[in-house]
Image (cartoon, coloured by chain):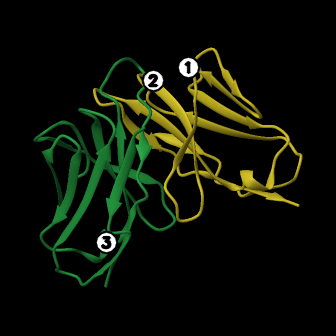
Amino acid sequence: RKEVEQDPGPFNVPEGATVAFNCTYSNSASQSFFWYRQDCRKEPKLLMSVYSSGNEDGRFTAQLNRASQYISLLIRDSKLSDSATYLCVVGLGFARQLTFGSGTQLTVLP
Amino acid sequence: SQTIHQWPATLVQPVGSPLSLECTVEGTSNPNLYWYRQAAGRGLQLLFYSVGIGQISSEVPQNLSASRPQDRQFILSSKKLLLSDSGFYLCAWSTPYSGSYNEQFFGPGTRLTVL
C-alpha cells in the first residue's frame, strides 16, 4: 500500500466548475499535511497547509479527517491557470520529512 | 525574503561519470535542507535531509551521497552515475523545527539525464 494515495486523474473540467481532490495516507502518526501544485517541468509550490479544523484560501478549501486519514482539496470557480498537477503531501519525523502522493492532474478547459 | 538556488538547471552526463549538484539558500539561518528526486512520470522521493552542518540523514540506499559543508549549502554527489539516476533533482528548505508544521519550499531543480 502506498503511503499517500491520490486519484491520478486526469480531471478535465470547464472553466467555472468546482472540482474536488481526495487523498488518503497510511501512517496514523503523520503530523503535518499540505497540498502543493506542480506545473509541467517545474518545481512543486506550496498551495496550502491543511489543518485539523479545515481551512480556506480564496477559492481553495482544504479538509483533514485524522480519524479516517483522509485529506481533501476543493477548488471553486476553476480558472485556466489552475491547470496543474496537485500533490497531496504528508509530513512526519524530527525534520518533518515529506511523503508525496503521485499527484492528480487537472486541466481546466475554456 | 528567502530564496533558494540550484545549479545547474540541466545536465547530461555519461554513465559512470561523477556528479555534483549544488543548492544554496539565502535569507534564513540554520534551515533544514532536503534533496528529492522525481523520476519521469513518478512522484517525488526524499533522498537526504539535513538539520545542521555536517548532519546528513539518508532515506534511500543508493549510489548517491550528500554533504552540508556550510549552513546554507547542500550538495548532492555521486562517484559513478547509473542510468537509473536520471531524473529531476529538487532541493528544498524549511525553518528549523518549531512545531508541527514546517512548510518546505523548493528550488527550481536540476534535470539530469544519464546516457
**Nearer to the camera, A82 or B63:** A82
Which residue is disc 1 drawn over?
A66
Which hue is chain B drawn in? green
Is any part of residue B9 visible from this angle?
Answer: yes
Q: Amino acid at mark 1?
A: Arg
Is any part of residue B62 visible from this angle?
Answer: no
Asked whether, in this view, residue B30 is left or right of residue A83, the answer is: left
- Discs 1 and 3 share one subunit: no
**Which of the two labelled residues, at mark 1 and mark 2, occupies the earlier sequence position?**
2
Instruction: Name the residue at 28% across, 42% down.
Output: B33
Name the chain letter of the residue that bears numbered label 3: B
Q: Secondary structure at mark 1?
A: loop
Which hue is chain A drawn in? yellow
State yes or no: discs 1 and 2 in contact (Cβ < 8 Å).
Answer: yes
Asked whether, in this view, residue B22 is left or right of residue A99, the answer is: left
Asked whether, in this view, residue B33 is left or right of residue A48, the answer is: left
Instruction: Name the residue at 35% across, 55% down.
Output: B5
Instruction: Name the residue at 35% across, 41% down.
Output: B93
Which residue is disc 2 drawn over?
A28
- Mark 1 burial class by Cα count in 10 Å: few <14, some 14-19, many 20+: some
Name the chain letter of the residue that bears numbered label 2: A
- Observer-side mark, 2 or 3, equals 3
Q: Relative to A52, is B67 above or below?
A: below
Q: Relative to B62, is B73 above or below?
A: above
Q: Relative to B26, is A72 above or below?
A: above
Q: Amino acid at mark 3?
A: Ser
Q: Tell me which corner region of the image, top left, top right, bottom left or bottom right, holds residue B105.
A: top left
Q: Position of residue A62 (x, y in %)?
A: 67, 29
Which residue is disc 3 drawn over?
B84
Q: Amino acid at mark 2?
A: Ser
